[in-house]
Structures are given as C-alpha cells and as structure tokens.
Image (cartoon, coloured by chain):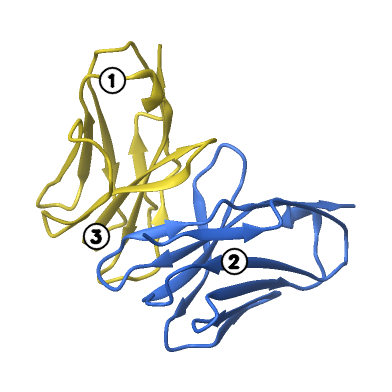
C-alpha cells in the first residue's frame, strides 16, 4: 500500500506570492490533517479535512486555507507569503475518527 | 489550550542501555496520545497509539504508558540501538477529530 505523498518536496517563493501544496493520503483514508513545523514553534496544527469538510482548524491566519477533493486528496494554499511562513509542511492521513496518523515526507517551503 | 512538554530535550546513551522519554500535558481531557519518531529531513513515523482508556501499549522493544490524571506519558526503549537515534515526539489528541498537540521532542543519540 502506497504511503502518504506530498508534492512538491521543495519550494522557493518570494514574499507576497502565493503557494499551493498537495497531499495524497493512503488509499481508503478519509481524514487529512496539515501541520507546520518550524525550529522555533515545533509542530503546529493547521487544519483537518474529513470527507471534503473542514473538521478542525488551528490558530493560523486566514492566509492559510485548504480543501479536500472527493478522492480525499487535499491541497493547502498560503496567500501573501511572509518570511515567517518558511517551514516544513507536513500532511497526515488516517482512516477515520482519531486514529493512527500516517505522515508524508513534507514540503519544505522557503520564502525569500 | 493544551500544552505538551517533553523532557529531556536531548539525550545521549551508549548502545544497549534502557531509557525513558517523558511527556507531560496540561489538560487531562485527552482522547488519545501518540508517540512518533522523526529522522532528519523526513516525516514522522507513528510508533505507538494509546487510547485514553488504556494504560499502556507495547510494540517490540517499545513500551508507552499513559497516566491521564497526572498528565504524563512515558516511552520506554529497551536495549537501545544506534538505529534508534532520532527525534521522538509525543502528540496529544483532542476529544474530537484528528487535531493533535505536539510536544517539543527529545533528540536521542545512541552511541555504538
């Protein structure tokens, strides 16, 4: 069974631009969560989607948004990028309600 | 807001030693707790998941315990090996959905 995949793996953007990250969960998994990991703040929860609906949301500004498609693939969008958005963005999938989380390798975003 | 703390931040042990990693959380109303390992530049790998009604879980050389009333969990690693070198993270699950609060991690180095 294929694991969680994230594309792209690396991304370099400049301030003010926007970016879209993609996450494909394990086949059959309906829940996709997104996290931001930085050296200073550690891992912070962004949001979770379950069956195309946002089920939970962390404390991030509205510049961070996401969506989930009918095939459970999810995208995360960050608009008007700031230097502080430089981070490793991880997505995780699980089969249902609060289950074992399977993480992807992450997308390393650098904002210049 | 749930605060999760891990002590120590870093640990270096000789191969073969048994060791304990600690995790504490401020709100005992948790749904579950997971232990992960993260290798440099990679995503997270789930090690053990403990439901709030359970006291411990075991997998191979790993044993995780949970004491909700005191807000603590420990990860015991028996007969450590160099391949165990990684950062270990504990994550506390909220009552609903797959929103997890992560600790700051313990960086483990096992010396051959």
**Snapshot quadrant of residue A16:** top left
Q: Residue at x 40, y 24 (%)?
A: A84
How far is mark 3 from mark 2, CA to CA? 26 Å
The yellow chain is A
Tell me if residue B56 comes above or below residue B13 in the rendering: below
**Residues at discs 3 and 2 both on one chain:** no
Q: Residue at x 39, y 52 (%)?
A: A3
- Colour chain B appears in: blue
Neighbor class of circle 3 (other Cα within 10 Å; few <14, some 14-19, many 20+) is: many
Q: Which mark is residue A31?
A: 3
Tell me if residue A76 comes above or below residue A19 in the rendering: below
Residue tagged by mark 2?
B23
Q: Residue at x 23, y 37 (%)?
A: A76
Classify residue A36 as left or right of residue A77: right
Q: Earlier in the sequence, mark 1 or mark 3?
A: 3
Q: Where's residue B29, x and y in %?
A: 37, 77
Q: Residue at x 33, y 68 (%)?
A: B94
The disc numbered 2 marks a residue on which chain? B
Q: Where's residue A107, x and y in %?
A: 40, 33
How far is mark 1 from mark 3, CA to CA? 26 Å
- Which element is circle 3 on? strand
Residue tagged by mark 1?
A81
How far is mark 1 from mark 2, CA to CA? 34 Å
């Amino acid at each position: 069974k294929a694991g969680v995949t994230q594309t792209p793996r690396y991304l370099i953007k400049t301030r003010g631009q926007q970016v879209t990250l993609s996450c494909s969960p394990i086949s059959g998994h309906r829940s996709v969560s997104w996290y931001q990991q930085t050296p200073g703040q550690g891992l912070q929860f962004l949001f979770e989607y379950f069956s195309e609906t946002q089920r939970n949301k962390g404390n991030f500004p509205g510049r961070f948004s996401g969506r989930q498609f009918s095939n459970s693939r999810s995208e995360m969008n960050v608009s008007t990028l700031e230097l502080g958005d430089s981070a490793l963005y991880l997505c995780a999938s699980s089969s249902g309600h609060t289950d074992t989380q399977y993480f992807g390798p992450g997308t390393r975003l650098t904002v210049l | 807001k749930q605060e999760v703390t891990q002590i120590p931040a870093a640990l270096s042990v000789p191969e073969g030693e048994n060791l304990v990693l600690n995790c504490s959380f401020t709100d005992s109303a948790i749904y579950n707790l997971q232990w992960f390992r993260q290798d440099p530049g990679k995503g997270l790998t789930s090690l053990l998941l403990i439901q709030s009604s359970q006291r411990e879980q075991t997998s191979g050389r790993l044993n995780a315990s949970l004491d909700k009333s005191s807000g603590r969990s420990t990860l015991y690693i028996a007969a450590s090996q160099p391949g165990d070198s990684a950062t270990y993270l504990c994550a506390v699950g909220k009552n609903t959905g797959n929103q997890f609060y992560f600790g700051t991690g313990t960086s483990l180095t096992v010396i051959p």
